Structure formats: C-alpha cells, structure tokens
C-alpha cells in the first residue's frame, strides 16, 4: 500500500490492495493449517489495516519512500527503525513457494525490493484485478435498483452477482 501511495494512487487502490493482501495472507495461513477466522479478526485484518493506513506505520512509511523512488536501503535509513515487512518478505515468499500458494502482491513487492521490477510496472501488472474489484463495487451499488426496474426477484440478482463476484475473485487472486 505504501508503494502505491508513494506512486500517487489513492484510496480505491489502497482498499483493493488491503482486501487482496488479506486474501493472499489468508490463503497462505490456511495452507499452513491456520484457522480462516484468524484473518478476519484483530490479529489478521485489524493488524493489516493499521499497518497499511497508519502514518505511524514503519512499513507504510518505507513503502511510500520506495514508491517515490528511494532505494530499499535509503528508505530503511530514513525510517530509522526496523521495517518488519522488508525483513519478513523473504520468509513469506519462501512459504508461498513451499505451500504452492499464489501471492501476486507479495511476489510483486519481492520483485520491487530485489530491483527486478520497477514499482510503477509492478502496480500496473496488479491493476487489472484492482479495477475488477472497483467495477464490481459499483455494480453491487446499483444492482438492487436495476433488479427492481427489470422485475428480477431479490434473490435472483444477488445469486448472479455473487457467482460473478466469486468467479472474478477466484481468477484474480
């Protein structure tokens, strides 16, 4: 999220990255034997939200600096304290490979920090599913009115949208 903010992306990208990031973390944790509920609670989503939104977050600060063009070492020096996400990234990538869990956001951050991919290019590669998420959000906002206008039973439009949403999340994740 910090890298995206450093590049000038806004709240929609932030929300999409947090949501999809939690999905990635959940898949890895579940593959490792964790309970799915853990990732919906304070130690999962709660911690992720604070890490990705608090101006006191060292991870967010470092990411914003990297998004603005600083090297990893320059960002760590400017933050002046331990940036846990940078230190934990190699383990997350190793575990994702070990458990055969796809983690596109984590892999993109690894490529950025390793200098294999520029931050803007990495985010552009992730954008398609971010836009799918934003479009679906807008569709879900108008779906009840449309369903009423064309006389689709309440449960009918919800089932169709749920199926489409599930499929798009599945292929995007």
Image (tube, rainbow, N blue to C red):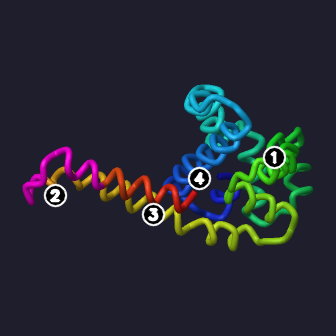
Q: Main secondary structure of the magenta part?
A: helix
The residue that label 1 is drawn on is 95
CA gap, disc 1 and disc 2: 44 Å
Cβ–Cβ under 8 Å for marks 2 and 4: no
Q: Earlier in the sequence, mark 3 or mark 2?
A: 3
Between the C-alphas of marks 1 and 4, the distance is 20 Å
| Image location of residue 141, percent across then percent down | 28, 52
Q: Is residue 33 above or below residue 6?
A: above
Q: Is residue 67 magenta?
A: no
N-term-proximal mark, 2 vs 4: 4
Identified at 73% across, 67% down, the residue is: 119
- Of callouts 1 and 2, the N-terminal one: 1
Question: Label 4, on which residue?
Answer: 17
Is 157 part of what is drawn in magenta? yes
Q: Secondary structure at mark 1?
A: helix
Disc 1 to disc 3, how far (Cα)?
28 Å
Q: Are marks 1 and 4 in contact (CB under 8 Å)?
A: no
Residue 17: x percent and y percent? 59, 53
Q: Which mark is residue 132?
A: 3
Q: Which residues are magenta?
A: 148-160
């Amino acid at each position: 999220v910090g890298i995206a903010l450093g590049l000038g992306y806004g709240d929609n990208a932030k929300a999409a990255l947090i949501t999809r990031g939690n999905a990635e973390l959940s898949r890895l944790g579940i593959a490792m034997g964790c309970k799915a509920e853990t990732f919906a609670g304070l130690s999962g989503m709660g911690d992720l939200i604070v890490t990705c939104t608090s101006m006191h977050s060292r991870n967010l600060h470092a990411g914003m600096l990297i998004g603005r063009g600083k090297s990893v070492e320059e960002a760590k020096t400017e933050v002046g304290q331990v940036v846990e996400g940078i230190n934990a990234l190699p383990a997350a990538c190793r575990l994702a490979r070990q458990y055969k869990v796809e983690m596109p956001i984590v892999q993109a951050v690894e490529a950025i920090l390793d200098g294999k991919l520029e931050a803007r290019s990495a985010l552009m590669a992730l954008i398609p599913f971010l836009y799918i998420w934003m479009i679906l959000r807008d569709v879900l906002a108008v779906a009840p009115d449309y369903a009423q206008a064309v006389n689709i039973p309440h449960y009918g439009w919800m089932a169709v949208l749920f199926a489409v949403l599930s499929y798009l999340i599945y292929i995007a994740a």
